[in-house]
Amino acid sequence: MGCGVFGVALKREGQLDSFAAVGMTSITHRGEESHGFAALEQRRTAFLGLKDGIKIRRGMGPAMMSSEIFEKPIYGRFGTGQTRYGTSAGNGFEHAQPFGYKVNGTEFAISHNGNFPNIMEIARDLGIGRDKANNSSDTKIAGMLIAETMRRDPNLGIEEAIGKALKDVAGSYSMVVLFSSGNRKGLLAVRDGYGKMPLWIGGNDAGWFVSSETVTFEPAKLNAPDYRRIIPGEMVVLDGNRVDSGIIFKATAGHCSFQASYKERIDSYFESPVSDGNGRSIYEIREEIGRIIGRRYLPGGSKENLIVIGVPDSGTLIAVGYHDETGVPFKLGLRRDPYVGHRVYMMPSEEDRERMTKAKLDPVRAVVEGKRVLLMDDSVVRGTTAKRQAEKLRAAGALEVYLALGHPPIISGCPYGNDFYTEELMAKGGDVARKLGFDDVFYISREDHASAIGMPVKSLCYECTTGLYSQPVELLPRSERRN
């Protein structure tokens, strides 16, 4: 699952929900289907009738609207939260994270971003069965593996148990774990060795925070300027006053290229192991994608009567970059309804995607009528949005409609946490322009996309564009996916 995770470790006991409100709303765009927050509520709050221990609050819908979390005081020092987008195999309340566990006097709760495609095979080897109603989430089963590892070896601490339980698990994970074991209490964050899903850590005078994106640490959010990426294979342990870290898995970097084109906010940074600082801002990356496309593509070989527009929000910056490079007029030719959820790709069913697409975006007739229109978008996965926009633009009077895309063609499913499947991908076989209803479709190349990010192709994951996988994973059809 391509979700968002958050963690907080305060130096002194405080009101955790105030930090959760800021941290989790900053990553709501990564998952709007459900959300949750687990907190280690401590004895000082006993007068409120709360027991010492981990308490989990979960709810449906976007985290920014959560009455389950933000309208009730949560006191303590440590907490973790997740914002989730659902899949067809599981998008109900029972799949909302975090998940909690108890074993050998240890309590822990997990928030996870990623996917474990082979986890059931490992679970069966340990004798852990799967009840469809309760254990269908791969994250939930990962927690069961960790708990079972601790049960079998009571001398293992939570850090050692995680390393041992997950060492043979394929897929990807950026995971935040809240734990309480006797006098040891705290938070830990861990990434798999491939580092496909992002994870960052930052601090300020109040404590330390973990998040899927750097926007969480900006001055307008938690104001934690001292932040860095958690590198692939690294585990970081926080007690609120100290940060301990170490490499527990061999690192083989392969950051997800789709994050840069689509997933991340424009005020976040895309991590880079080949440059100093925080890497390159998503804003700059998307503008550069547009500039590169401008050097490679001109519809019909002519600028005559041509305008460029973008699909909000990520396509808009690509269109701006294209305009800067070519001088083709940039126009706000699509209006997005502010009351409709904005991530069509994340909707769990084709019916939901069609319904949202119809309501979400409308062309501005005064802008597109009588024009040759170049539409810029971050990517095409299933083609739901693009096909509808081609129809709407022509109905609004556009003479010709072209599409340029800021991510290479996605031809194979993702086993690492992006919710798309080989059998439903628009770019897999056939004439994409004809299928979508455009006069022509242009894709940026892998080499040019990596150049816009500022990294070599080999440092990024483009496996969905090649069908060649770095891990021994089985691509299941949508109907059989577990998470």
Image (cartoon, rainbow, N blue to C red):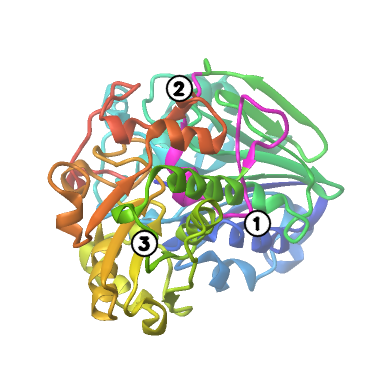
> Which callout, 1 or 3, points at the residue further toward the start of the chain?
1
Q: Distance from label 3 to label 2 (Cα)?
A: 31 Å
Image spot of residue 316 (x, y percent) = 49, 62
Give the number of marks: 3
Q: Which residue is mark 1?
A: 23
Q: At numbered mark 3, what does the secondary structure look like: helix, strand or loop?
A: strand
Image spot of residue 448 (x, y percent) = 45, 35
Count residues near mark 3 (Cα–Cα under 10 Å), then give few for <14, some for 14-19, many for 20+.
Answer: many
Q: Which residue is mark 2?
A: 458
Q: As shown in the figure, which amino acid type bears the numbered disc 3?
A: Leu
Q: Nearer the viewer, residue 202 or 111?
A: 202
Q: As shown in the figure, which amino acid type bears the numbered disc 1?
A: Gly
Q: As shown in the figure, which amino acid type bears the numbered disc 2?
A: Lys
> Which callout, 1 or 2, points at the residue further toward the start of the chain?
1
State yes or no: residue 50 in magenta.
no
Question: Magenta region: which residues?
Answer: 252-280
**Residue at 48%, 33% in the rendered image:** 450
**Residue at 45%, 51% in the rendered image:** 262
Count residues near mark 2 (Cα–Cα under 10 Å), then give few for <14, some for 14-19, many for 20+.
Answer: few
Note whether 304 is above or below 76 in the view shown.
Answer: below
Note whether 437 is above or below 453 in the view shown.
Answer: below
Q: At numbered mark 1, what does the secondary structure look like: helix, strand or loop?
A: helix
Q: Nearer the viewer, residue 420 or 49?
A: 420
Q: Tag on residue 374?
A: 3
Image spot of residue 439 (x, y percent) = 22, 59
Q: Distance from label 1 to label 3 (Cα)?
A: 37 Å
210 sits left or right of 372 in the view: right
Q: Nearer the viewer, residue 265 or 208?
A: 265
**Residue at 55%, 69% in the rendered image:** 68
State yes or no: residue 260 in magenta.
yes
**Residue at 45%, 43% in the rendered image:** 295
